[in-house]
Image: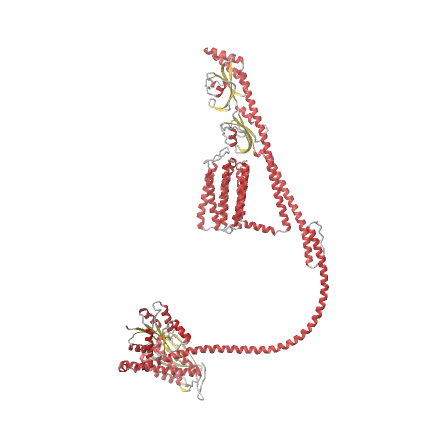
Amino acid sequence: MRETYLWLAGLAVLVSLFLIFQIIQRLKGNRSLRYLLVAAIIAFFWQAAEFINVLLQLDEYAIIYMRLEYSFGLVMLCLVLFFFLSYYGRMKKMHIVPISVVVVALVVLALFTDRLIAGVFNEGGVYIPIFGDFFWIGAMWYFYLLGSIVLLIFIRGNETNRKEKSFLLFGIAISACLGMVSDMLFPYFGIMSVSLGGISMVMALSWIVVSIDDFYFIKAHFSRFSLGGKVRVMIISTAILLTVLLVFSSYIISKKAIEERVLSQLDSVSYLKESSLNEFLLEQINDLKSIAGDESFVSFYETKYHTLSDNLSEHAYAHDLARKQLSAFMEEEENYEEVFIVGVDGLIHLSTSPSLEKKNVAQESFFIEGKKGVYVTNPYYSLMVQHDTMVVSAPMINSQGSLISVIGGRVDLSAVSSLMTQRTGLGDTGETYLVNNYNYMITSSRFQEGLEFKKAIYSDVIKDCLMGKDSKGTHINYLGTPVIGVYRWMPQRKMCIVSEISQSEAFMPITRLRNVLFLVGSGLIVVFFFISLYFSRMLTKQMNKLLSFTESISKGNFGETVSINSGDEIEDLARSFNIMSVELKKYDSDLKKHQMALEKTVSKRTNDLQEKIGELERTKRAIMNILEDTNQTNTELSKAREELRNNIDKLNAMNKNKDEFISITAHELKTPLTSIKGFSELLKNESVLNNKEQRDKYFNIIIEDTQRLSKLITDMLDLTRLDLGTMKFFFEKTTAEEMLEQLKNLSELQVKAKGLKFICKTEKIPGFYADKSRLTQVLSNLVNNSIKYTEKGSIIVSAFKKEDYIHFSVVDTGVGIPKDAQPNLFQRFYQADSSYTRKVGGSGLGLSICKGIVEAMGGSIWFRSVPGNTHFELKLKYLQRIGKEKTETKVI
Amino acid sequence: MVKKILIVDDEPHILELIKAVLEVEKFEIITATNGVEALKKLEAVTPDLVILDMMMPGMSGREVCESIRKNPKTKNQKVIFLTVARFSETGKKVLDDMKVSDYITKPFETKDLVTRINSVLKSK
């Protein structure tokens, strides 16, 4: 019944696990969440199993569950350490401290729980809970769960990859191996291996579920196997499955059968032992009864012992005589260690051990019960003789029928023990022993000396047995060995007789069977492997034949046939392929005929075409020639168009410049005009005219602006002439000295007014031809600019000849021209600094005019300037003679 | 109440002329010879009208007007432009966008100048 419940619970757990894993699998993307859920689910079912366990009182399994948790803790610990080690290199330093703390805490916790668990198994292998409560077990589990959460959070930070997964599986495999090794080394820990195996399975299962994607990967891989591979995999997996099923079922059935046989054997042994024990005791009773019924002894004891009691010496003599008789009797019956007679007063009158005489045994059961009839005590530990003993007693009755005393005999217990330890069909490890109702072993063990009355045995089967319930089955005995045994209650003796044999011996044949089954199974798998090879090869051989046949057809070898006599679908396929091949050949020959006819027609047509093409070719060549000419014209045209476009662009730019120029010119002209007009209007006013100060001021402004206007107009006329190329130059002979002298005179007033030095430098240069007035205009413009922008220092004007040119330079120590203004200096209406210009006057056309004039005369002008040194220089062709008046026209 | 007028022109003679004409009409006159100076003066004083020359070196009259409109304090300032050319239709549209009250073309009649200024000052 219990087992049925357990199986049902297990099935329910598996189904629920499957369903929940299905749900988890849909939680894609969040790997750590899946891990956590798996951990939580395992925890839940663990607790559920505990609950069922408590509910159904599955005590034997309870031990297994305890062990499970213990080993699970170890596995978790191993995993935590394992991860700690495998991640150590990659961890950031900040992680090491908290993780170390967690690991150390887990180790301490594990040690603590280990103590807790270790304490609960007593020497007899019987589980005695220290806290007697499943609370602690649950709490322990939650501690582990906490550890795993920490672990999983840690894993989350390092997104596990395939390699790490295989590491983990490796760890699980190692723990399973450890369990197996521990099973071999310490049979007592056998349960641990079971549990480790279970844990490994659960973990592997959950791991497979969480990495279900890899599963699909395997599935996809399988579907890409070759036909032979598929056949092999299918046959071998079926064979393995069948073999495993066969081996397991036969193993389990035979185990059950053997268990029953062993139990019946043990049963008969225990009956045998019981009856021989009874027989032995009966014999002792009969012996004692023979003394008690010996009339001569009884009468002797009664008369001599009781009547001569007043004569001490005679009494002593009779006493000795009686003791001798008892001793003689005891020697005859070798199983007694002492025979004694108790008087009705409860004192031992006579004993084979004189030291015990006169002791009061009035309260002992053998005296009380012995007065009534024959009585056998249970084996017990006697305080009087200081060792364990068993007493048989019987009443001594005289001829008149009245009780005179009780005769008792201490039975040698070693005789009972040897009776029990005798090997009667119990093999090497089997034994029979007695347990009294204080749970103490009262006969000696075959395997360990001196356990009698020292070894208490607490186990459920013993408990049941002592309560009068007979049982049989497997359990762990006082030595911690898993045994199979029979436990029977002996009501007259008030003892439990135990017959048991170690499982390893009892199941020896099954182990042998298992090994044979394993070998046979492996052999079967190997055989199936070869069978699968044969089948797959047979299949693929024909398929390959078919494949090469179709390949040959595809190459054009129509009409070929293939012969396959497998008698299955492949033969059908081959047959239809053959039909196809023959049909193809027919079509092919038809096609070839058709093709030949077609070829003839085509070749005729081709010839016709060739002729026409020749004609066309000639026409084409003629057209090509014409086209070439046209092309040339075209390129010329496009060149011209491009030129035109460039010119238009230039013109547009010029137009834009012109608009700007006109607008500035208008401003420059209209500003003085406005002022002249306005002030003239004001002067019409009587009050203004009568105010002398105002009147003079206004007149001065009008005069200044008139001068400005007239200068502007002169400059613009010059510019227009230069632009139109209508400026006339009159060349006459002059010298450098003359030019410089004229310049000095022109600027003398201004130079003096500002307190500057004016220096002229010239080499000896022979006279040359030049337009004196224009050259003076240019040079004086440059000198005026220098004076305007120089507050103190000097202005140096020099003339020199270099190669075929005559150079003039004007250098000053003024403010200089700002860097950003330098590129635009020769532009019209450009002034380096407008606010300054107002102070110094000028139209902004001077330098533009200079450049125009110099270039019109075939020379060039340039400058360089830094603050404190501005250098303008111009060069003109050095003309030594000139035939006639010369006019040059140049467009700037 | 005496009306305040700020005149901005780079030509000192023009400044002198307008000042002389308007002083006869009893206006209070402030002058500036460039855009930067004009904007600085507008920070301190709020005139009833600004007469602004369009063609000035550095900041042009148009740029000065844009700055006036950008400043929340002076964005409703009345402005008259001084210019040498008549405006085309698109030019006038630009003037409207800049909320310029009127423009005066050089050379101008002194009477005409006074009339226009008075009409602008009267308008809202």
Pick the front one: A818 or A197: A197
Q: Name the quadrant of the N terminus of chain A.
A: top right
Image quarter in which the C terminus of chain A is found: bottom left
Q: Going 71% across and 67% down the picture, which residue do you hit?
A: A599
Residue A221: x and y, percent? 59, 51
Viewer can see residue A204: no
Q: How many dots with numbers? A: 0
B46 and A216: which is toward the camera: B46
Q: Estimate the x, y position of residue A491 in percent, counting from the top left.
A: 53, 25
The answer to whether one can see residue A14 in this image is: yes
The quadrant where residue A509 appears: top right
Q: Nearer the viewer, residue A358 or B94?
A: B94
What colour scheme does the image use?
secondary structure
The reply, left or right, for residue A772 in relation to residue A156 is: left
Residue at the spot 53% in from the left edge and 16% down from the top edge: A291
Q: Position of residue A802 (x, y in %)?
A: 43, 81
Query: In the drawing, does residue A525 fall left or right of residue A466?
Result: right
Q: Is residue A574 above or below residue B107?
A: above
B36 relative to A528, above or below = below
Pinpoint residue A207: horizontal percent, then vertical percent: 53, 47
Considering depth in this image, is A309 or A790 the residue closer to the camera? A309
| Residue drawn 47% across the image and 10% down it | A308
Furthest residue toward bottom: A884
